[in-house]
Structure formats: C-alpha cells, structure tokens
Amino acid sequence: MTAESTQLKKFTLNDLQKHSTRDDCWIVVHQKVWDITSFIDEHPGGPAVILKYAGKNATSLYDAVHAPDIITEELPKDKLMGLLEDVSPADGDIQAAPEPKPVLKSVPKPVEESVVEDDEIPPLSGILSCKDFEVAASKALTPKTWAFYSSAATDLVTHRLNKEVTRRIMLRPRILRNVSNVDMKTTILGNPVSAPFFISPAAMARLAHPDGELALSRASSNQGIIQTISSNASFPMRTIMGVAPPEYPFFFQLYVNSERKKTEEILKTARNLGVKAILVTVDAPVPGKREADERAAQEGTVRSAISGGESSKDKKGSGFGRLMAQYIDKSLNWDDLAWLRQMCGDMKIVLKGVQTADDVKIAAEYGCDAVVLSNHGGRSLDGSQPSILVLMEVRRRYPHLLEKLEVYVDGGFERGSDILKALALGAKAVGIGRPYMYSLVYGQEGAEHLTEILKDELETSMRLAGLSSLSEITPRLVNTRDVDHLVDTGEDSSIVRSKL
Amino acid sequence: MTAESTQLKKFTLNDLQKHSTRDDCWIVVHQKVWDITSFIDEHPGGPAVILKYAGKNATSLYDAVHAPDIITEELPKDKLMGLLEDVSPADGDIQAAPEPKPVLKSVPKPVEESVVEDDEIPPLSGILSCKDFEVAASKALTPKTWAFYSSAATDLVTHRLNKEVTRRIMLRPRILRNVSNVDMKTTILGNPVSAPFFISPAAMARLAHPDGELALSRASSNQGIIQTISSNASFPMRTIMGVAPPEYPFFFQLYVNSERKKTEEILKTARNLGVKAILVTVDAPVPGKREADERAAQEGTVRSAISGGESSKDKKGSGFGRLMAQYIDKSLNWDDLAWLRQMCGDMKIVLKGVQTADDVKIAAEYGCDAVVLSNHGGRSLDGSQPSILVLMEVRRRYPHLLEKLEVYVDGGFERGSDILKALALGAKAVGIGRPYMYSLVYGQEGAEHLTEILKDELETSMRLAGLSSLSEITPRLVNTRDVDHLVDTGEDSSIVRSKL
Amino acid sequence: MTAESTQLKKFTLNDLQKHSTRDDCWIVVHQKVWDITSFIDEHPGGPAVILKYAGKNATSLYDAVHAPDIITEELPKDKLMGLLEDVSPADGDIQAAPEPKPVLKSVPKPVEESVVEDDEIPPLSGILSCKDFEVAASKALTPKTWAFYSSAATDLVTHRLNKEVTRRIMLRPRILRNVSNVDMKTTILGNPVSAPFFISPAAMARLAHPDGELALSRASSNQGIIQTISSNASFPMRTIMGVAPPEYPFFFQLYVNSERKKTEEILKTARNLGVKAILVTVDAPVPGKREADERAAQEGTVRSAISGGESSKDKKGSGFGRLMAQYIDKSLNWDDLAWLRQMCGDMKIVLKGVQTADDVKIAAEYGCDAVVLSNHGGRSLDGSQPSILVLMEVRRRYPHLLEKLEVYVDGGFERGSDILKALALGAKAVGIGRPYMYSLVYGQEGAEHLTEILKDELETSMRLAGLSSLSEITPRLVNTRDVDHLVDTGEDSSIVRSKL
Amino acid sequence: MTAESTQLKKFTLNDLQKHSTRDDCWIVVHQKVWDITSFIDEHPGGPAVILKYAGKNATSLYDAVHAPDIITEELPKDKLMGLLEDVSPADGDIQAAPEPKPVLKSVPKPVEESVVEDDEIPPLSGILSCKDFEVAASKALTPKTWAFYSSAATDLVTHRLNKEVTRRIMLRPRILRNVSNVDMKTTILGNPVSAPFFISPAAMARLAHPDGELALSRASSNQGIIQTISSNASFPMRTIMGVAPPEYPFFFQLYVNSERKKTEEILKTARNLGVKAILVTVDAPVPGKREADERAAQEGTVRSAISGGESSKDKKGSGFGRLMAQYIDKSLNWDDLAWLRQMCGDMKIVLKGVQTADDVKIAAEYGCDAVVLSNHGGRSLDGSQPSILVLMEVRRRYPHLLEKLEVYVDGGFERGSDILKALALGAKAVGIGRPYMYSLVYGQEGAEHLTEILKDELETSMRLAGLSSLSEITPRLVNTRDVDHLVDTGEDSSIVRSKL
C-alpha cells in the first residue's frame, strides 16, 4: 500500500451500493474506488457493460479485458474517490464468466533440464533460432493466441512466398578479407541502433505474456534496437515507453480511426511522449481473411489500451484480427497525408504496407520519410507479391528512390542472412514481427535472447561473406537470378513480352 | 391432398391389375393412376421396364430413377385416370432392387454443436471457404457421388494446373485509395448480376441433395447470380426455372444429341421458358477418362429429366460421366452453328470449352456471343492447358477479341482473389462449378452461403487491392511473370525459339 | 501322348544309368531320352552341370533354367533316343536345389470378385491403366522379378524425367471438328499396324509369366501391333514367332556379342525367320547400375534361349541386368555398321538408344532406317536426357531428319495422350516397355487388355483434341513452353548464353 | 613387451607419488613413466588438467582425449623415465568421468548375414553407394559424431543445393564408340592419381573409427588417390603419413592460427614430411552455425593432435565444429599470401573455399596453384551458391582461368556421374568429404570399398557416355540448360536484365 493510497478515504461495499445508477456510478478496480459517471457514455465497450457493475467491485472483469494502467491513464485524478477498505482483494469482486485466459497454456522447463520431450517447451538455453521460438510458442500459447499470431490470409500463398523467395536468393561470399571486427551499427530515420533491424508491430502482446509490450520495451532498449508500438497494444503508450530509459527512441504503428478525433488524440499522446516516427498501416483498410484465426474459439473479450479496439465472436467466426480492426477508416487515401503530416508534428511519417514500386514513388512525391515494404506478414491480401520482390521491383524501376527515402522490408525474415540479403538489395533495415511475439513465451529474457541470436547470425554471416561493416554491402553480394524473372517491370508483362 | 385430387376417381390395386398389358397399361406413381399405354414405346429406358410394372404401384422404382415432376411434364393431363384409394403410400409399391441411394450418406451436424470431429460433417456455420465445402462433401456424399463430382481425367494434370497456375499469378495491391464502398455488380450478356461469377453446369444435382437444381435455382435467384442448367439436370427445365421469380435470367448448357430432333425439342422448350443463353459444350465430343468415377460402383440407374441420358455399369467400368454422355453427337462442328443459331432464336450462343486462342478467334468470326474458356474442370482431355493460361493466350495474341465477345473462364476458381485475377486478365466473369455441387450438402442454404463467401472474399480482396469497382481493374493489378513463359505465342515454339 | 511319342522306344531308369559318362551321356527331359554326348562341350553353362545329370532325369533342373522348346530346337532329331517308360513324370527326377521360382508369387483374383484389398491382385476387369498394371505387378511378381523390371539406374533421375518432361508438355485441343470416326492406323518401317506404338524389348518375359514372350506374341498379333523380341528372350526366336500367324511382322532387338560369330548366327536365324528389322541396342555397351536389382537376391540361375546370357550372383550383387549383359561387345562402333548391314540382308537396321540429335544425324549418314530415341527406360546412364527432350532436340536442330528416317521414342510413355505428344513432336511411333512386362501378370489376356487400353486412350485423346486421323497431328497440338528451355541447341550453352 | 621397454627402469605407484608437484611432475601413460615437468606450461589444455594427475596413472584420461602416439611425438626421448612395474594396465589408472565414447555405438554385421533389419548396420558387402554408407553411419556412429559430420549451416539450403544443382545437369551420352578400355588416370598438381577425385579434409576421423586418419591413409595409398589431412586431424601428421609408402603424396588442409608461430611450426613439419600441397581454408574465418551439432550433447573433451583445437560445451551449445575453430585467425587476407608462400617452400598453395569467379581471378593473380570451389559442404555460410554453380560461373566469365590454375570442386558429389559432370564443366578433380568419413564405420576396408565404388561408377558412366579417357570429356557432354539461368554474369543482374 503506497503512501498515496493511505491518504485516501476508505469505503465499504455497502457504501458503494449507494452509487449504482447511471447518474451516480462508482466502481472498484484493484481496491481503488472510481466515480465513472461522466465516463459511462464514452466507454468504447458501450455503457451497458459498465452499468452492470455499478456500485460493485469490477476488478476481475476489468483485468480480463483491460491493461492494468488504462483506468489511471484515462480518468482524471479527481475521479478517484478513495479505497475499498482493507479486505481480501477479491471481496465482492464480480467474476467475468468465462474468465479469459490470455496467457501461457504451459510454461518453459527450468533451465537445468536439458532433455526436451516432443510436447514440452524447451528451456530458453535450448533455443537456437527463430524457428525454435516458433515451435516453443506453438506449444506454450493458448490455441487462440497461437492461431492469432501464426495465421495468415486464406491459402497462405504470400506467407509462404515471403520466406521462399528470400531463400531462393543466393549469397556470393568473398574470401580473404580481414573480418576480425564487425560493425553492424546503423541509423534508422536518424536514430542510432545497434543492428539493422527493428521490432515490427503486433497487436496485444499481453496475450503471449503478462508483461506483453513492456517486456519488448525493456528488451529492445537493453539491446539498442527500436520497438514499433502497435495501435492495438495491450498497454498504454506511456506505460510501454515508461519502462525504457528516458529519450529512448520508439516508433508507433497507426491505424487511422473512422472517427478521426480519436486518431488525433492518439497522435497527440505520441507526440507528447516523444515518439520518433509514425508507421501508418496502409495495407489493411480491412483485415485479411485469416481462417485459422476465425476458427479458433476465443473466450471472453480482449481490448486494446490504445485504440480501444475490441474482439469477440460474431457470425463470421472468431477472427481476432478482423474483429479488432472494425474501427479502421476504409476511406483513408493519399489526400489524407496532409492532415496526417499536420498531426504528426516532428514525428517522421512512414507508410507501412507498400506493395508496389509505383506506390513507393508516390510516397516519395508526398514527402514520406520512409516506407515499409510489407504485406502484413501475408495477413492481408493473399497472393500479393512477397516483400523482397517488391524491394527488387523498386531497385529495378526506381533505384534512385532508395536514396530519397528509407526503405524497410518485413515478412518472413528469420535469419541473419535474410537480413543481409535485404540490405544488399537496398533496404535500410528489416522488420521482425512474429518471432518477437513468439519470443515473449519467455518474457523479456526471450526477446533479448532473440535479439542476440539475430545479431550473432548477422555477425557470423557478415564475417563469412567477407564483410566488416554494413557500408561494405553491395548488390554484388547476392545472386538473385533464380527470382529475377518474377520482378515486375512496370509494363503489362504478358503483352509486352510477346513482342520478343 | 389437394382440391384437384379429391375430384379424381378412386381405384383399388385390384382395379389396376385389369390394366396390365401392353395394349392397356396403367401404373401408379405417388397414388396417381396413369394410363401410359401410348407412352410405352417412347420410354427412353425401353418398354420392358414399364411392362414389368403394368397394373402396379411403381412409385419406389420411379423415384429411384426419375425427378418428381417428370411424369406430369411428359404425359398429357387426360392420361391421369384417377387416384389409388387412400391406403399406405407404400401399399403394393414395387421396390426397385437394389434401391439407389443417391442422397447423403451422412448429414451435417446441428448448428449448436461447434466441435467437429475428423469424420463428422461440420455445421454450415463452420464452413468458411470452398475448400471447407469440399471436405464436407467428401464426408457427406455417397462414395459414388463423391467420385462423380470430384474426379477428373486420367492423371489429374489439368485439374491441378487449373488451380496451380492461377495461384502462381501474384497480385499488386495499390494503397491509400478510398475503399469505403465497393461495387462488384456487372452484367453477363446484358443480364445484370450482383457479382462477376455464375454457376457452371454440372449433371444430376439431385445426387448431392434431394432438392438438387431447385436448391441452386432458389439460391442463385436470391443472391442475384445466374445458374447454368445442365443438359443432364435431374429436374426438368421448367421445374428448375419455376422456383425462381418470373423473368429471372437462366442459362442452359447444351450437349447436342446425335438425334438432332431431340436437341431441337430441348431448345424449343428453353426458348419458350425464356432461357437467356445456350452454353454449347464443345470440349467433350466424348467424355474424358475419369478413373475414380469408373472405379466407384454405382447401384441402380440414374436418368436425366432433360436429356434422358442414363447411367449404368458396363464392361469399361461404372463411369457416370461416360455413361450419361453416350447420346452426344461426336460429329458436331463449326458448320452446325448455323443450324444452332436458327434453333436458338433470341437466345445468346456461348461456346463452353474453348481451349485455344485460335478457336476464340473462329468463334468470334462465327458470331458467337461469348465463350467459356474451360477444360471441363480437367475432366475432358488431361494435359490440356489450364483455363487461365488460355485467357492469357487470348490477351497476348488477340487482345481485341476481349472487346468483341464476352470471355468467361472456369476450372479451379475457388477464391475471391482467383476471380479478381481472371478479371484483371480480361475475363468478363468466372464460372464456379464443383463448389456449388459440394455446397448442396447443405441444400439451398449451402449454395447461398457459398455465394456469400465468394462475394465477401471478392469484396475484401478488392478493398485490399485498392479497388472500389470492377471498372477500376486493369492488367497492372497482376504480376503474371511466374507463368508468362507458359503462354502459347501462336507459333511452333520449339522451332521458333531456337532462332534466339 | 502324341502319335510321335508312341513310336519311340521305351527305356527304364536302369537303362539310362548305362549312359552316364562323358563319352556316352544320355539325359531325360520331359520323359524324352536324349543322347547329348556330342553336345556336352557346347553347353553354354559348361559341361560340368550336364555331367552331373548324366544318365538321369533332369526335367526339373532343365525347367528351372531353360525355355520348354529349347532342347528340341538345338538338338538334331536323331539324338532323341526314345521315351522314359510311363511312370510318374517326376520319377527319378533330380531336383535343382534351391529350385528357382521365376513365376508369380501370387495370382490375380477371379473376375467375379470386384472388391480388392490392398494386398490383393485385382482381377483384370479392374485394371484401367498402365499404372494399375504396375501396381498389380508389384504385388504379383516375385521380389526379384519386380526388382529386375522396375529398377532403373542409380538415383532414378532419368527414369523420373522421362515421365515428368512428357507430363509438362501441354495439349492444345481444337473444338467443333467432326470426330465421329477416328483412324489411328499407320505403318512402321512399311509394316502396317493398328496403332502408332510397339512393344519395346525386355529380357526374360518368362519371369513374369510361364508363357512369357509367347503371350506377347499372341497378344500383339491379335491386336495388330509389333513386338520387338529381346536378345535375352526366354524362348527361342522361332518359338516366339511360331505362335503368331505366318508372315506376321516381328522386330528383333540385338546385343552384339563379343564373339561376333554368335551374333552372326543369331542374325542368320532372324533373317531366315523373316524378322523385319533389327533394333541394335547402342545405349548399353555395359549395363547401368540398377541398385534395386543388385540388392534383390536371386535363387538359381536364369538363361536366355537366344543369347545364352546367364545370371547368377557375384561379388557386386545379384544384378540380373548386369549379369546377363556380360557377353556384350563394348567395342561396337560406327564402323561396325557395315558388317551389320551385310549380316542383316533385307532386314531394316534401327539404332535403339540414341540420346543426342548429333547421333541421329550420324545414324542418318550411315544409312540407318530408323532410330529409337531411348535411354533404356532410365536403366543405362542415370542423368541422361529424357527421350522426349531428345526428340525436341532433333526437331529444333535437324528437323529435316524427321523426314529422312523414322524416329521412335520410348521411356515413360504410359498414356494415350503421351503417345499423342510424341507424335506431335515428330515421332513416327512410341515404344512401350515395362507396362507390357507388367501386363504379363495376366498372361496373353493381360497384354491384349493393355493394348486395348492404350488404343482406347489414344482414340479418346484424339477425339478430345479434335483429330480424326494421325495425319492431322501437327506441332501446334502441343504447348511445350514449360520445357523448351531444356532443349540443347547444339552449342556450349553456358558460354554462348553469356553473350546475351 | 618390446626389447626397448625391458631395458627401462621399473617404478611402482608409490615411487610415482614422489613426483607429483609442479616442479617435479611425472605421469604414467600406457605403463610408460614420463617426466613432464617442463611441458606443463605448454600443454594446450592448460596446466591444471595435468597437475591433477601428477604422480599418477593417467592412461584412461589420455586415451579419451589424445591420439595414441602423440606423447611420443611431442616429448623428447630423455623424458621417458621408465616403466610402471608389471601390474594390470588399469592399476592405479585414473578414470576420466564421464569417459568419452568417440567410437561406434554399434558395429557392422558379419558379412555372411545378408538380411539387414531396419536398425541394423549392413555388412560392407551390402554397401553399394555413398548413400548406403551414409545410412550405415547414421546408425553406427554416436549421435554426437553423426551430428558433427552430417550437419550443415542453419537451414541447409546450400547443403541441399550442392546436390540438387548437380543433379539438374543432364548428360548427353554419345553412342557407338569403342569403350573396351577406359582410362581414368590423371594428375593433381603434378601428382599421378588413379582417378580424378581426392579425399577432402574432415576433422577428427577417430570419432568415426579408432584407426581414424590412419585408415584413410592406408586406403588412399592402396587405391592411388590423395588424402587431404585436416588441420584438426586426430593423429599427428607424421603418424598419418607414416602408414603410407614412403614418398606417397599427401595434401594438408590448413587453418591459419591467430598465433602465427603455431602455423609456422605446422607448415615446417609439413614441409619436412614432404607434403605436396597446402589447402588453405578460406571459407571459414569463423565457423558456420550448424544447429544439429550445437544441439547434440557431447561427453568429455576432444582435441586435435595437430592444431591442438579442443571442443567442449559452452553457453551457445555443444557445436563441435564451432568450438574446435576458436584458434582460427579471422584477420587472414590476401596480403598474408606472401607470408604463406614463404612458409610453404616447395609445397603448392591451394585456396579451399573459393565461392565466386571474382576470387578465382584474384587467386590466379596472386599466383595460387589451384583452388577448391567449395562452401565447406554447406557448413559455412548458408545460402551461398552451390559449388558446381561457381564452376559454371568461372567457365562463363573467365574460361581462360581454367587453363591457368587447377580448379577443383567439392560439396555433394556422391556419384561417378557427378564427377563426370564437374569434369565436363572444367574441373580438374573433385573432392569427396563426408562419404569418406561415413565409410570409416568399416575402417580402412570401408574407405577402400568407397573408392572402388566411385571408380566403378565413373568407369561405367564414362563407358555409357561413349568415353574411353578423361581427355575426351568436353562441355558438350552435359546439358546445363535447366540451371544456366542461375549463373552469375558478373553484373548486378536485377538492374541489368531490366534493360531487356
């Protein structure tokens, strides 16, 4: 019990019951008594659910749906009326039925035991690669969470192509170069980072671990890389950034809300918190059809602490991604960039989800600072070109753009050598998404271990390729001839090629 | 018992036995007593089978072979002599031995049960895609029906290529376009439809569900799409069209009969019923060799209510498709189009099964209104080019033809994004065949659900591609470079290319 | 007991024992008593094995190694001394230990039972395709015989490519052509045949069925196609040809013996018997390494009735193909064609196993009448080009050669549509090898059924392609673009193409 | 007991205990008593481990870590103080705990038993191919040893490509050439060999068989081929070369040590022993990430008798390859070749691990005598180009280099026909690595059998290709068109090709 709380007035459950109407509505969350009367109509989940708990202890229900700090963030201090008197925390607490279980269905083995059975989660010391994290997550996460993170659109064609095309690009290592020291430091939009990759945004990290985005924040700041906070994060932006050192750079991923005011609020918060760049997602005006996600039943409701997006079953299924995306503005278009620029102030603007060289060109014309060539990890339009191929398309058709703005890629990058290939083809950095979600099975420690693995693989790959710094990387490092024919040339290919 | 029936004379089984000779032959079907004396020699199944039941109740046998309304359609009203007196319907009914079982071997689960075991048919609410319908059908249909619908010619090469080549075409989604509203309405041969796809014809839908083509008719008219009635439908054309609203547009698929008179009769019926277009099947002068169909044993005999085509085992096997096709005219050729035009009157003529750009060109020269690029779902000549490739061939060699007549494709299209690719390459609409047969496991409701899935997938795909109407689709939407080299150029490729 | 045999003198086993020395050596085979004294030193298996049975009944041993008629063929009539008196045929018969079991390990089911379990051999009526015969053979043949016929060289690369490249060639069917009548008759080296395929040679058909090559001979002459008799046939040439109608055309496959005199003898026999063409095998100066064949243990010894080639285990393994090939002349070269021409008289000379367009050109220059583009069914040099690709190479580089000599292909052709593709690319006919061996599981009836299947498939494919006679086939029937890039151009490709 | 040993003084265990300090330290190994006082600080494993056994019998521990002869090699003769008195050899012997088991976990079956169960190791007579040796090794070797030899870097992409690209190259056999006699003799760097392949170096052959490199040495000298001794061999160079006839040619593989003096010592030894060539490994400044090797737990410590490299577990895992490589100099570069040339004297210098044509060119400019195009069997940088493709790159871009220096390849070559393909593309010889390690399951006899298999396959392949000597091999022997497009052209391909 902190000093602050001891100064607050104490109430009993009986006292509370006097404030149980729409015009006078108190609730208890974690022993704190709040007057939420003026907030009832603003509740993203609607007023009904609040009124059901008017004058009662709503802690369990709140915890099932919200991030811990959100009520403190959202309500003014003068609405904190006092504390419930010192009883068992659960006293009078109304249980949500059924209670969501958004955390691990199973926990990793203690480190000392090294033999891992097929259905056991290995200790972190046994994890050697992104793939190992994926296998561990498939065992540790609840079926619903696993389905949400691992799923991709319809037939998984783009999801597979993302990895496959990258793997078909060969490396051309040079020999007999002094590789005693390897430097993989770089900058991303002017922010110095320890390695040329960053954490791509993914919703609701608390599903994978109670610490959720906080674990990623601590891990990334320890490791010197940048985390992109999701619009649908489970913790408030301030809380996430609060666990990193002051001034540590963060990016924020933005879904524009149909109610633009809400987006303006969020951007104002971001600006005030010192967020360095806004990654506007442009590949998902509506969510893709992720069938595994639709099929996996979910219990209870999950709600983002930032966007307020919520998920529960409807007649199309239980698609987490689809349900949380309902607030997204389908009308967003190039003309809105002027408004966005105004709202962003000094924050850089990055378009995330660019899928053609044509749109990279337009992004440059509109003055965007960077683009992420991305297909949402194969989760939006199935059949769309793999990210690495779009990068090759930019290089072939508009190579000068690679100088004009920073170009990143994500989707299927899982090895240090994958990152190296992207850099050779002109990317400034690579986004890593699902692997970080999977690493959260082990919390912050897992995310740090993943970062070290990727750095170690990149360092080893650079040495074996004869490189001692990123600046030595050139397109001649790769042999792309197995996939060159797939690159769009900017013309209606089937017609044009018939002239040959 | 309707008003009509109460006015009819009543007979006993004893009465009937007095009319049991070739010169005076009555039978009972569904309690109605018919004098079929003058019809004996016209019976497509031959006189013997009728005489066997002269003066008897033939209801069970009739039901096993015929559609319910066919006797009413084919016999003049004055041959209805009266009713069998009110006894148990089965009384005196002669059982066909063995009785055919052309309907489901198993039925879907009630909707409320959501957990589906491996050998259970899921409730319709659990069906998310064409593939789901296929899996359900593989469980629900009798082995023979499943073999008939799912089989394709010999080694299934073309069957696989149909899907594979479409999947190898990549999409190039554009970003930041206002996709709040999506319009997928179009016209097919002048008939307005709610979406750019139609139901491809398939024989004997009653095998999949007792309502057969009637379910498709109700579903397609509810959903605003067009059904193509098969020459080998299990119900008469009039009955099928009768369950849709008056004037609702229908297409009719035609196998030309070696006895041309029979075809002329059918076309006359179609004309009178207001059929909008005749899809003449040109890819099956003989049926392909579908080995799974040949192997699956069939019980009893099945007969089309339109063509009169019948199926029963012979020494080559039990091939349903092969046996029902025996009446088809192998001599049909371009010169017959003049006769066909004459017979069709105002009905449009569409060639279904065009497999080369050369033949699209000839079809245009002969004044055909449209063509369906099709290989009969891989069921005719195995090894023939996939439909989407023929579409690309037309675009490359004779792009102007795409303006001159309407070009459709079918074969392996199962996703909204598949339809989108075909449209980008110049198709006006896409035919969906097997999935509708599979949807009939759930009757009309299944066919409507399938239509909604396809519309929903197409709408989502359009939004994700940055499209708000079909008119915005261009060839630049697709990257076909992975398959461009497969497109025929109109020359003897191996010789010509050696000059390079 | 025939009239002939009743006139012969009778002997007892005791009588025989008086003739049991090298200078006076009688043996009994199938009750006939032979004086083989003068033949002892000529025995291909060496004198020792004969002397072991001097004065004894050697029927069982003889049957295990030799074809039934061979002793009658090879010994003059005056060496038949008489008959063993009428006792049990096995009386005094010396058993070979262990007795070889070169026939079926299991027999097909009676036709009336149509349900086939996984480990049962289906009745012939259930066989729909080459593949079905292959499955049946894998169950019915002894493991050794199955290994011998089904095996191919080392990693089976060419064996797989043979089928795969043919399957990658697509067909371009034309529509609306009168295909009421289909004519697939043609000539092969001037001999009229009912269809454009022939039976490729394969050794020791008696391993698959007691009737061996006799069954093939009866089947092919009934069906109007040509059988190529193997140098390593299990019956003498005269016997094989004797079961077909007089003057029926046969081809003979020749391995040239290191002892040229033996080859001259064989060719003399062929000439006298009216063989139409000699297919000289040129792709196997030594046998390929067929590991499955080497691994499968063989019991006893097998010996060809024509070449005298014999097989038994040695230190490299039990390779049937390798062991029977030991007599082949590794020095055979182009200069030997003059000698061969002289020996062949009017018989046509066909080189079997040509694997490059360059060698087709040389063959034409040397005046060969035809070539078989073949890689010995993938059994010689693994990695060599598939036959269909060599055909494409000939077409591209020396199209005029297809007019100058007849070009056949074999290796992996299993469907009527496969044959159609070869014809479209310039082949005059296609050789079918393994499938005929597999069909022998069912004896003559099996070989006829296979022939009918292939004809039926070819006829159906022609109809579906819009063809009513072989003369209408053109290269435009096929789309080879998926494999065109694999065709050798006659230049050192990797160097030349770098100029592009 | 030899004459020598009987002249030595006898000690008891009690005597020894008087010499158990750092200043007076004796130990017993195989009954011999050594004074190792002056050697304590030079011990590569550090002084601690030695002092632990001061004054004791250390035979078991010594055997677990060292090759038998190493103590005799490394210590001067005057340090042999005498013999332990004649007691049980194990008397007083200190056991290492746990004792390493670096030899077979199972032994091959006696030759007479020919039926091999799935989990049994076949007798050598049943081994027909490299693949058979691999299967046998996977059963016979300890899991750790199997993991060490069979593993490759990260996703095994290059490991697979090595084999796959070679297999995709087709052969173009010529017919009717006299192939009675086949000559496959050649020279490698002037040394006459019986066939165009050599044994590639691999570490610690004693792991696979107690005779380790000695078995390879005896086998290769018997067979007339060259063994490349690994820097990390388990026996001293002198011992390995000592079991071959005097003057028999050997190559030595060199990892340059960060302590250059140590490398100079080793090269001096090599020079003195008459080693013919030094293969400097240039593709592994650091070891690749071999995850199977990291995962497989190892017991005890293993130490090379040449480099002194040692392996034991650390926090990254148990990677044998990684741990033994810690002494390698990451700074080695082209400028060091001058120093190396000086140290090598008359020994030829070969760069092993060249992976681009550009580096072959530089190697030629620096006067190297030969290069091995190699990617360390896919064990270094995963994704690097397969060796055969680099060979094609050299041929395309700098064909004259193939005349200027000798070019070898290794990585995935397992068949005589694989070797033939490499020779056709310009290689002088092919290195065989893993197969020789696997053959050691059967000791020297296994390595000889492998050599005979490869020779036999090459001879057969040459005959079937129409070749009677290596000099007849030309590029026209192969059809590389399936992989030609993969060959780097020396330009930034994706940019350049867009001009087409």
Image: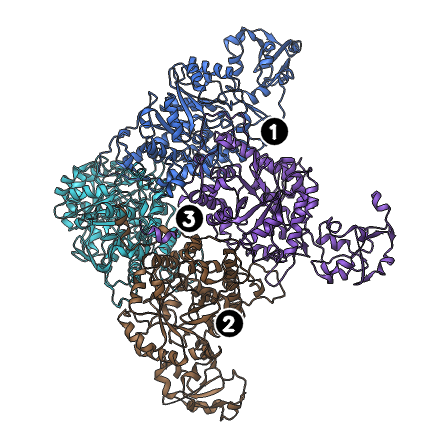
Chain colours: A purple, B brown, C cyan, D blue
Camera-side residue of D133 and B387: B387
Left or right placement of residue D53 versus residue C183 in this view: right
x and y percentages locating residue B42 in the rendered image: 35, 83
Camera-side residue of B167 and B96: B167
User: Do callouts 3 and 2 mark residues in contact (Cβ within 8 Å)?
Assistant: no
Q: Is residue A139 above or below residue D333?
A: below
Crowding near the residue tagged with mark 3, few <14, some 14–19, many ≥20 C-alpha atoms within 10 Å: many
Kindly report the distance in space between the C-alpha atoms of the residues bearing marks 1 and 2: 67 Å
Left or right placement of residue B163 versus residue A499 in this view: right
Residue at 57% over, 33% down: A185
Q: Answer whether residue D257 is visible to the viewer in this image.
A: yes
Which residue matches tag 1?
D314
Do marks 3 and 1 both belong to one polypeptide chain? no
Identify the secondary structure beneath mark 3: loop
Which residue matches tag 2?
B219
Do marks 1 and 2 both belong to one polypeptide chain? no
Closer to us: mark 3 or mark 1? 3
Of the residues shown, which amino acid type is indicated by label 2?
Ala
Closer to us: mark 3 or mark 2? 3
Q: In the rendered image, which quarter contains the C terminus of chain B?
A: top left
Q: Which mark is residue A488?
A: 3
Q: Answer whether residue C30 is visible to the viewer in this image.
A: no
Q: Which mark is residue D81?
A: none
x and y percentages locating residue C176 in the rendered image: 29, 67
User: Do callouts 3 and 1 mark residues in contact (Cβ within 8 Å)?
Assistant: no
Q: Residue A335's quadrant in the figure?
A: bottom right
